[in-house]
């Protein structure tokens, strides 16, 4: 009887550990909002290494990228998660946009194909997320079809959300406009590139992970 109880306790504890170990935090948003820049900031702060490559050309990240076992600390608390950096979500991907960015036609078509697959993968992965950070460019209009679609999908799945208004260091940034667009969520203005206000961002993560 004692051995049975021990096995039950061990199973219970191991299941708790597994849930904590496998906690997935996803970075979602439109292309060029700064998801990978933020992922790199998190990984540099807590792992001492980058997550992925950043580019001014949209859809640089076209595959799901994962960094496991990131442990962040804030005000005496700890949070361990697997960070999932997703390709930017777009309603339309036109290879001609990449040509205008300086790519040759063959390369542009290949990138458009990979980017389209990336969008599909991002949406599929939503079902695996325990919490999501939506990364928006705070210099752009937050009321876009893509942003509203992302928020709608997360609400339908009842996934905890933190919204980041990135590029807050730029003059055109308007964090209040982002807050007004999505008042149901906590919105934090940061500069992922320069690390401005990232401490508040980390505190915000603890608030959505309960």
Image (cartoon, rainbow, N blue to C red):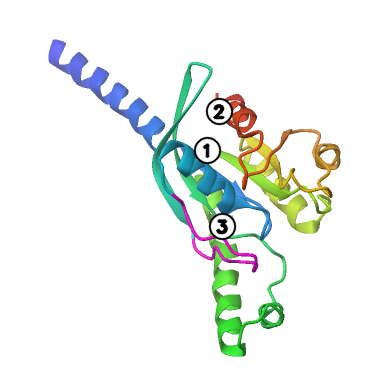
The disc, 1 or 2, on the residue closer to the chain's N-terminal end is 1
Rendered position, 86 above or below 77 = below
The region drawn magenta spans 50-63
Depth check, front residue: 26 or 2: 26
**Which mark identifies residue 32?**
none
Report which residue position mark 1 lands on: 130
* Quadrant location, the C terminus: top right
Q: Quadrant of residue 117?
A: bottom right
Q: Quadrant of residue 158?
A: top right
Rendered position, 90 above or below 197 = below
Rendered position, 95 above or below 192 = below
Residue 206 is situated, as x and y percent measured from the top left of the image, at 56, 26
Report which residue position mark 3 lands on: 122
Residue 1 can be seen, yes or no: no
Which residue shows up at 60% across the image and 51% down it? 35
Which residue shows up at 30% across the image and 22% down it? 13
């Amino acid at each position: 009887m004692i051995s049975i109880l021990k096995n039950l306790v061990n199973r219970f504890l191991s299941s708790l550990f597994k849930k904590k170990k496998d906690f997935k935090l996803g970075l979602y948003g439109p292309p060029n909002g700064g998801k990978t820049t933020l992922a790199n900031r998190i990984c540099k702060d807590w792992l001492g290494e980058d997550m992925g490559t950043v580019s001014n050309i949209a859809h640089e990240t076209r595959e799901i990228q994962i960094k496991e076992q990131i442990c962040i600390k804030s005000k005496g608390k700890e949070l361990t998660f697997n960070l999932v950096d997703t390709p930017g979500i777009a309603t339309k991907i036109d290879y001609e946009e990449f040509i205008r960015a300086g790519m040759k036609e063959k390369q542009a078509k290949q990138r458009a194909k990979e980017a389209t697959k990336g969008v599909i993968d991002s949406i599929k992965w939503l079902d695996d997320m325990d919490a999501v950070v939506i990364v928006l460019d705070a210099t752009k209009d937050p009321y876009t079809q893509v942003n509203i679609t992302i928020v709608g999908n997360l609400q339908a799945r009842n996934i905890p959300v933190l919204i980041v208004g990135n590029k807050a260091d730029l003059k055109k940034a308007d964090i209040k406009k982002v807050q007004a667009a999505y008042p149901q969520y906590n919105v934090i203005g940061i500069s992922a590139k320069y690390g401005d206000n990232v401490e508040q961002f980390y505190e915000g993560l603890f608030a959505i992970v309960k």
